[in-house]
Amino acid sequence: MMDFGTATADAPLIKDVSEATFMADVVDASQTTPIIVDFWAPWCGPCKQLTPALEAAVTKKNGKVRLVKVNVDENQQIAAQLRVQSIPAVFAFVDGQPVDGFMGALTGSEIDAFIDKAIAAGGGDDGGLEEALLAADEMLAEGAVADAAQTYAAVLAEEPENATALAGLARAYLALDDVEKARALIANAPEAIQNDPALIAISAEIDLKEASANAGDTADLHSKLQANPDDHQTRFDLAIALAGKGDNEAAIDELLELFKRDRDWNDGAAKEQLLKICDMLGPKDPIAKQGRRRLTSMIFI
């Protein structure tokens, strides 16, 4: 039977453990801080790549998670108890239990996502979830959509009414061109956060993405509009297409021009669409601020 020893205070961020200290350094320690356990061996080539990456990722978290390393050659009982069949093998411990794990190598963003999920599962500290969300935003911006989605989902598992995480997960679905899933997610949002600015913004983005898919090619629409500047539908379609390509400033310009020419066209569609773009951009965005100001000025002329 293993002699697990006793817990020690002020454990370092990264350390090697043995069968004698596993209970204190992993099981007991994970009651207060998520612990990442890295099973490795000196002869393991992939371990030499993974372990430094784990160390760097854990160090970035500034104490919100810790890493312990287990040499399987010297600690075969621990490996057997956790059914480690190949290495590298990594487990996340929270509240004394393994809650997640993987075998083999991962990319940097996948490691970050794994660690963020562990922090979220452990409840983190006051800033833990916020840091996980920031990391997820970075992953999404870098194109690591699946990793971002996993992190947003982990935050939602801890805080089902976290509007930022819900909006982020919807954005991940949009990045995968799964508009239906994104819309369903927002439609089923908890009542308490349905009017949160983050959800209003993503809802507007979903509407714009759907509309822009059928708006047409911007070059063709430009040519058509030049031939007939009073073609309101073409100008409206051009604005939608521009917004779909991310050129929101140009889209707002076209909608303002349409509003100036005929503010009542199609039941005020120009004003409605302009405000939807502003909702998507958010109240602090300079393009949205300017667009709202210009619209207000036109309304009262």
Image (cartoon, grey):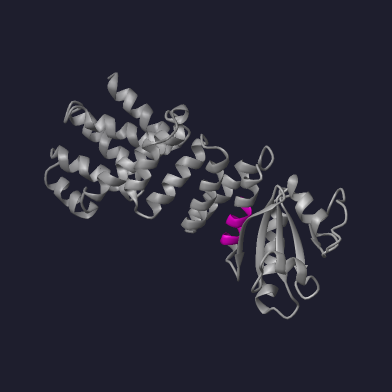
Q: Position of residue 184 (x, y in %)?
A: 35, 41
Q: Residue furthest top?
A: 300
Report whether 109 appears left or right of 179. right
Number of disc labels: 0
| Dominant secondary structure, magenta | helix
284 over 225 or under it: above or below = above
Quadrant (top left/top right/bottom left/bottom right) for the N terminus: bottom right
Q: Nearer the viewer, residue 178 or 246?
A: 178
Q: Nearer the viewer, residue 25 or 152?
A: 25
Quadrant (top left/top right/bottom left/bottom right) for the C terminus: top left
- Work out whether residue 140 can be spotted: yes
- Work out whether residue 13 can be spotted: no
Q: Position of residue 163 (x, y in %)?
A: 49, 36
The boundaries of the magenta stretch are 109-116
Q: Position of residue 174 (x, y in %)?
A: 38, 50
Let me know if residue 207 is in the magenta part.
no
13 over 47 or under it: above or below = above
Report whether 42 appears left or right of 227. right
Q: Residue furthest bottom?
A: 43
138 over 189 or under it: above or below = below
Res 254 → quadrant: top left
